[in-house]
Amino acid sequence: QVQLQESGPGLVKPSETLSLTCTVSGGSISSYYWSWIRQPPGEGLEWITYIYYNGYTNYNPSLKSRVTISVDTSKNQFSLKLSSVTAADTAVYYCARTLDAGYFDLWGRGILVTVSS
Amino acid sequence: DIQMTQSPSSLSASVGDRVTITCRASQSITRSLNWYQQRPGTAPNLLIYVASSLRGGVPSRFSGSGFGTDFTLTISSLQPEDFATYYCHQSHSIPYTFGQGTKLEIK
């Protein structure tokens, strides 16, 4: 069965770049969209971006200027970079498989990223 | 952006109760509405997609309905494992947006 696993630093300093990777196991990254979604502690969910396996992307305009998503089909991974982070970017970051109709049918367990000096 | 408003924000109910959660979109999203359940400390889990389609493996006590701007999630007979937070999500337009969540608590 397909599983997703986020990885990356749990602590990032203000003004630096947050970098996360999602590894897809048990299935191919091809033929699907893949999203990043975040959830600040005690708050709701915010969709950040998605990428298709061929590299097509879409971004949340509220974050677009600071976000880059990429995919590496040879490694069955996709990645998120968020630049110039502040404390407001502290959140659990989830990766999720996104079907054509836009819903998220598989999620990683999430990774807490804290922005602090 | 399309704003998603859930009501109520929190709800107390008992095992066996029938519960309905409402989600309203700020503009028509046709049937592009999905529901997720999130238990504390875990990732959200898809329950319902495109307004009324039950995901495989999800108990049939969960159902969804609606079209356009108004949608509902109904749990016909609450079970202990259903006490969680529920989110609606529109996938009609970018950026995808979520409701603020409804926390379902035990009375």
Image (cartoon, coloured by chain):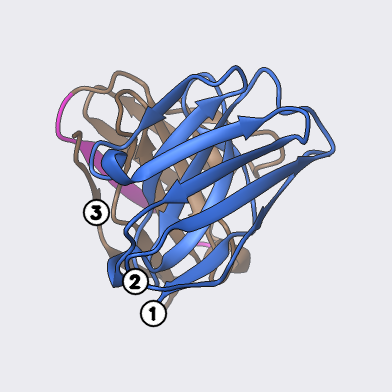
Callout 3: SS: strand
Q: Which chain is brown?
A: B
**Residue A111 percent location from the top left of the image:** 58, 64
The answer to whether the residue labelled 3 contacts the one labelled 1, judged by CB atoms less than 8 Å apart, is no
Q: Chain of mark 3?
A: B
**Residue B13 percent location from the top left of the image:** 41, 69
| Kind of residue indicated by mark 2 | Pro
Q: Which of B106 and B1 lies nearest the eye of the viewer?
A: B1
- Tag on residue B4? none
Q: Which of A52 and A75 lies nearest the eye of the viewer?
A: A75
The answer to whether the residue labelled 1 contacts the one labelled 2, judged by CB atoms less than 8 Å apart, is yes
Callout 1: SS: loop
Question: Which residue, given by chain and number where applicable, does mark 3 sit on?
Answer: B7
Question: Which residue, given by chain and number where applicable, does mark 2 sit on?
Answer: A14
Extreme front residue here? A16
Question: Which residue, given by chain and number where applicable, does mark 1 sit on?
Answer: A116
Q: Is residue B84 magenta?
A: no
Q: Which of B53 and A16 lies nearest the eye of the viewer?
A: A16
Between the C-alphas of marks 3 and 1, the distance is 35 Å
The answer to whether the residue labelled 2 contacts the one labelled 3, judged by CB atoms less than 8 Å apart, is no
Q: Is residue A73 left or right of residue B84?
A: right
Q: Which of B2 and A62 lies nearest the eye of the viewer?
A: A62
Looking at the rendering, the stretch of residues picked out in magenta corresponds to B16-27
Q: Do the residues at discs 3 and 1 belong to one chain?
A: no
| Kind of residue indicated by mark 1 | Ser
